[in-house]
Image: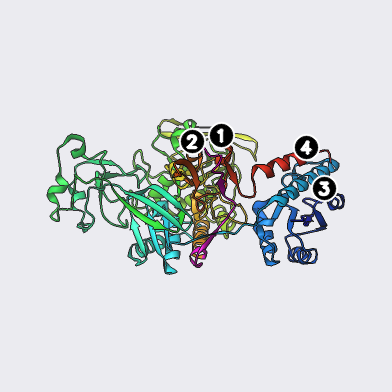
Amino acid sequence: MKQRIGVFVCHCGINIASTVQIERVVEAIKEYPGVVHAEDYEYMCSDPGQGMIRARIKEKNLTGVVVAACSPTLHELTFRNVTALSGLNPYRCEMANIREHCSWIHKDVDKATKKAIKIIKTIVEKVKLNEELTPLSVPITKRALVIGGGIAGIQSALDIANAGYQVILVEKSSSIGGHMAQLSETFPTLDCSQCILTPKMVEVAQHKNIKLYNYAEIDDVSGYVGNFKVKIRLKASYVDWSKCVGCGLCIEKCPTKVASEFEQGLAPRKAIYVPFPQAVPNKPVIDREHCRYFKTGKCRVCEKVCDLDAIKFDEEDDFVEEEVGAIVVATGYEVYGVQNIGEYGAGRYKDVVDGLQFERLLSASGPTNGEIRRPSDGQIPRRVAFVSCVGSRDPELHKPYCSKVCCMYLAKHAMLYKHRVPDGQPIIFYIDIRSDGKGYEEFVQRAQEEDHVTYIRGKVSKIYEDNGELVLLSADTLAGMPIELRCDLVVLGMAICPSSGVDELTKKLKIQTDANGFLTEAHPKLRPVESLTPGIFIAGCAHAPKDIPDTVAQASAASSKVLEMFGQKELSHDPMVAWVDEDLCSGCGVCISLCPYDARELEIKEGKRIATVKEILCEGCGSCIAGCPAGACQQRNLDDKQVIRMVETVLSRG
């Protein structure tokens, strides 16, 4: 086939044009073998730019298209759709990245221009050898899995279920609700957290389209977009929830007390317990680690007092398998451990607490029924210091990122403390104030002006105890003077971190995390709720630190992507997958162990072991190609011949 390639060079405003001489690029490419047309436009991705491409495909009878612009991650699909609308196979269209790979990383205009020309030539050579491919079709199982039962998981599950689709909701704790259930009031409206959360928790439990697995974890995930198979571990609760009516007698009679996780260690719970009174489901579990029977073989009081025979000490973990078409990961967050900040005395001094502990002191259902009491002696603290950015924005020692919500919840804490203790003195130490949500700046101003919260700009260097008082050493950087402050209670605004166990979960799901352990989105602007693995979406603090409104918004956004999938009869899968030259394949199996998507298997064909590709699972990552010792593995539209031709083009003097 005679090649008739059209090249379209984008200015990208000044992103490319300020470093690359566009006219010079167009003139050079016009003369390149196989290119029959080349032109430029300021914004090639705009409607006029796309119209230009459609018109030239027909006018010039083009057999291939190269768009020299930004990253293919951003607009490859855009330009392939343009070529398809013009009757040209979309896989005869490629993008030459002269922005991220050229203009953005160079200052020398002459060198950048020459490099841009080289990049475009390599892609022209690639297009010459591109096959005309057809997307693969994938059936859809129209059920969704939501991992995590905090507010993000709850919102996502309800959105999908309310649209008429079945949802499997898996929560590792014995109750849904997450950290939001621990909060007293929420900024900036100061409405009761329980009042807005618990009705949603009940709605989840009662919804006909939601199957709730509490006290459960994901054991294994296989399959692909539209057709995932999920194995769920149902952890032994040692209580038959089908018999239990939640009367609480077993809890009342249990002789063992341990620190309550829900109360952040500020109050005890029993070895058989419900995490909090509003739990959903409101059924107890036995803490095997602290239960006297499991430790000593004696006790069994809970079993003796249960008339319903609901206590099952011989219960073991069980497994169920579910088939789903899409997965939403909403695994939430954990607070950075105070034990990591030794200079603040947290863990040694009872009256140095973190933000979640203070939430429980503020809560009407907390260990002090909403009265602010010092954990050490139960006295009302008359001066409380709130320290922001503890463990956050500290790349040298702790976490480099901003935890986003700390400025706001410390302002809320100080305000609520002032409401509880009108003659008390709240003081906030801060680096700077980040109040970027709707009504947030006004909330901070209200704390300062109406509730008389004192703000001191300075980072606390040390906290120690002296004669029953806590002493903070800091500096007022605005006044330019050192500060030594004595107070009764210190609240630390700790960094927000990914939940424990996320690393193992991401390996099972085959999705990526960033350097800090948060889930990575496919594109930070255009695909913020999609993971890099098709069919798996992310929501809430699993993605990054977020407040409640942003968490709920992202959860609904993830749900909308699921519903977009379920609205189709079938899904299409990119056909640029790996394939095997059976004449070269030795059946060694190296590619099988290398494939991160389980898209490889060995088959016996005519008495010979051959590696085969399950195309619907293959994501075209290239691991098998790089590892194949026989060179039998290739990828469609990126085979060895194309790569060699591109390398030769780069190295040529032309």
Q: Which mark is residue 629?
A: 1
Image point 44% across, 64% down: which residue? 160
User: Is label 3 in contact with label 4 (beta carbons under 8 Å)?
Assistant: no
Percent position of residue 266, x then y: 34, 43
N-term-proximal mark, 4 vs 1: 1
N-term-proximal mark, 3 vs 1: 3
Q: For mark 3, give the secondary structure.
A: loop
Q: Amino acid at mark 4?
A: Leu
Q: How is the image coloured?
A: rainbow
Q: From the viewer's perspective, is the residue at label 4 or at label 1 nearer?
A: 1
Neighbor class of circle 2 (other Cα within 10 Å; few <14, some 14-19, many 20+) is some
Image point 78% across, 41% down: which residue? 106
N-term-proximal mark, 3 vs 2: 3
What residue did someone put label 3 on?
20
Q: From the viewer's perspective, is the residue at label 3 or at label 4 nearer?
A: 4
Q: CA distance from mark 4 to mark 2?
A: 34 Å
Residue 84 located left or right of residue 279: right
Neighbor class of circle 3 (other Cα within 10 Å; few <14, some 14-19, many 20+) is many
The stretch in magenta equals 564-590
Q: For mark 2, give the secondary structure.
A: loop
Q: Which mark is residue 651?
A: 4
Neighbor class of circle 1 (other Cα within 10 Å; few <14, some 14-19, many 20+) is some
N-term-proximal mark, 3 vs 4: 3
Q: From the viewer's perspective, is the residue at label 4 or at label 2 nearer?
A: 2
Task: From the image, give the main secondary structure of the stretch colored magenta.
Answer: loop
User: Is label 2 in contact with label 1 (beta carbons under 8 Å)?
Assistant: yes
Q: Amino acid at mark 3?
A: Val
Percent position of residue 174, x then y: 32, 51
Percent position of residue 47, x then y: 73, 66
What residue did someone put label 2 on?
588
